[in-house]
Image (spheres, rainbow, N blue to C red):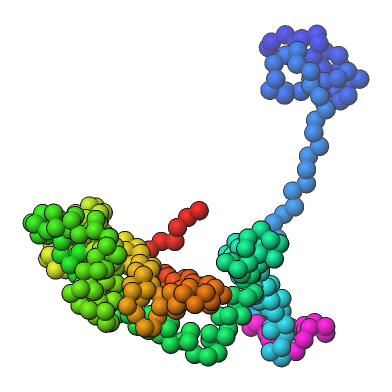
Amino acid sequence: MSPVSATSPLSTGEAPGKATGKPTRRATGKPPGTAVGPEPAERDVPAPGPVRQPGPVPEPGPVSVQKDPEAAEGPEAATGRRAPGAAARFAGAAVSLLYRGFTRSVAVAALLAVWEAAPRLGLVDATFLPPFSEVAFAWWELALDGQLADNTAASLTRSLSGFGLAVLAAVPLGLLIGWYRPLAELLNPLLEVFRNTAALALLPVFVLLLGIGETSKISIVFYACAWPILLNTISAVRTVDPTLLRLARSMDLSAPRLFQKVILPASVPTVFTGVRLAGAVSILVLVAAEMIGAKAGLGYLINASQYNFAIPQMYAGIVTISVIGVVFNGLLVALERRLTSWRLPPTH
């Protein structure tokens, strides 16, 4: 038998497990000398209950929508809600249109105001530059008695005839010269000679060869309009983006298809630049031609008014020519936008 230790419970006569008033060290799994705090209270973990089986999903019943008593009934409700937005867009478009119209007309209005005020204030002689109001009154008198309509119709007939013939002849010729280099090298010296010869310098030649009738006037307009169209068309074909040509050739397009699908669309903007220049030239040259040997036309009206010292009527004819030029250019710009709608809008 092993000797009983003096500090064991048996040696002291105390029953095992009986409190002795001294703290009893319990095994905590920590090294000796470590302070042992109070034991955390044990948590009561509830026993898992029975698992509930999912029941059948109830059928969705009819959804009740609560209507706003203040909301309008019927189709007028949607219209009433959208009306403010549509009205705001309409008002914004109207304001933008009025602003653009104001910015475009303010310079013209200022010019007319100066024209009206300068003769009345004595800054210029009213005999040679009457106020704009007198010119407008003279224009109205010419319109009432039919002189303005007759002379305008005669001028427009000659101008549009020569202009149209120039477009029909110069555009195909310019496309051919721009596309075929040998033809361009052959005709280039001749083009340089005639492009530097003023149309009005050849007016006596046209009168001598074709007479003083309508043929000479239409011919001089044709000659003057052909050069801007021809030169711009040649430049348009020669300045087509080379990348577009390489891409088209990589797709094995034939020469006619390449010309139709690439060359023509890419040339339209530059060609129309020449057409617009020719439109202005057609009116200017015609007025000069009508001052020589004509019995009708705006140029004849201006020249006859000068000889008769009817100065307001003379200025009325000049204003009519200016208005026709502005309208003609606006029509050409609208046609250009129609034919070049595929272009991206310019970024500002």
State which quadrant residue 6 falls in: top right
Instruction: Estimate the x, y position of residue 36 in percent, counting from the top left.
Output: 79, 21
Magenta segment, prevailing SS (helix, strand or loop): loop
Q: Nearer the viewer, residue 329 or 89?
A: 329
Q: Nearer the viewer, residue 149 or 10?
A: 149
Is-magenta flag for residue 280? no
Residue 247 located left or right of residue 7 = left
For image coordinates 64% across by 83% down, the residue present is: 59
| Relative vertical location of residue 62 with respect to residue 134 in this rendering, above or below | below
Q: Nearer the viewer, residue 267 or 333?
A: 333
Q: Which quarter of the image is occupied by the N terminus?
A: top right
State which quadrant residue 120 falls in: bottom right
Q: Is residue 121 visible?
A: yes
Instruction: Estimate the x, y position of residue 287 in percent, counting from the top left.
Output: 38, 72
Q: Point out the stretch of residues depicted in magenta.
A: 59-73
| Relative vertical location of residue 323 with respect to residue 37 in this rendering, above or below | below
For image coordinates 58% across by 84% down, the residue present is: 140
Instruction: Estimate the x, y position of residue 202 in percent, counting from the top left.
Output: 24, 65
For image coordinates 57% across by 85% down, the residue present is: 141
Instruction: Estimate the x, y position of residue 294 in percent, counting from the top left.
Output: 34, 80
Q: Nearer the viewer, residue 210 or 345?
A: 210
